[in-house]
Amino acid sequence: LPESGARCPIIFGSFNNLSKMNPGVIALWARVLNAVPGSRLMLKARQLADPDVGQRMRDAFAAHGVDPARLDFAARTASRDDHLALYGAVDIALDTLPYNGATTSCEALWMGTPVLTLAGDRSTARYGASLLAHAGCGDWVAGSPDEFVAIAAGLARIRPDRAALRDRVAASGLTDGARAARELEDAYEAMWRRWSEMP
């Protein structure tokens, strides 16, 4: 794992598919960048292999007052290991909304990169909150856009320790497959009991 606090400036990032990058996401992330002077944003998505796509993304952030030079792009990596290693270049991962990341958020947490999410009002907008709760990182779940920006700025100041985060995730319910299976079995059993007791 990369050494915590080894870099300056703060690098925010997202490895989610660009189809999740709607105008609301861009506006919110621009607020984060504007709240943390000197910070940068790294986006990794296969679509960014197309220069026109990258330019449209730069233009979208520029419309919110973010210097396009503060954006860094990556497309495909040569291997899965290279993909995971790229999380070492990101200090704080930003979750998309209303369709949250799932695999990308789990990867980030496992690689010691904090994930910040904004809890929404539907299941796809609460994946992030659920993952973070199970990982013992519920304090990175925002309830409003203003809180999202405030948490991001706070994390940028303290730069959470990567090794400690991976240890926390490894010891959490998020990586406990046996526990998840037991809880699923218990849920099925409870549903069966309710159904069998119906008149």
Image (cartoon, rainbow, N blue to C red):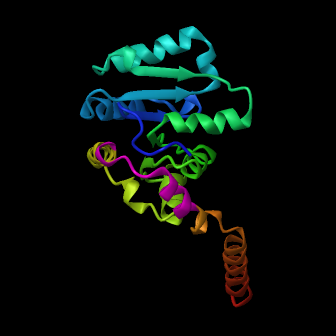
Left or right, 47 with respect to 156, comes to right
Q: Nearer the viewer, residue 126 or 72?
A: 72
Which percent across, then down, holds residue 155?
Answer: 34, 47
Q: Which residue is rendered at x = 59% and y = 43% of the image?
A: 104
Which percent across, then down, holds residue 102?
Answer: 60, 48
Left or right, 52 with respect to 145, comes to right
Q: Nearer the viewer, residue 48 or 184?
A: 48
Instruction: Indicate the quadrant where residue 187 lies.
Output: bottom right
Residue 82 among magenta residues: no
Residue 158 among magenta residues: yes
Q: Which residue is rendered at x = 48% and y = 58% of the image?
A: 164
Which percent across, then down, holds residue 75?
Answer: 62, 22
Instruction: Indicate the quadrant where residue 59 lies.
Output: top left
Q: Above or below — where is 71 with respect to 140?
A: above
Q: Which residue is rendered at x = 47% and y = 13% of the image?
A: 56
Q: Which residue is rendered at x = 51% and y = 54% of the image?
A: 163
Per the rendered image, the range of residues in magenta is 156-169
Q: Nearer the viewer, residue 71 or 59?
A: 71
Which percent across, then down, holds residue 188?
Answer: 72, 77
Q: Main secondary structure of the magenta part?
A: helix
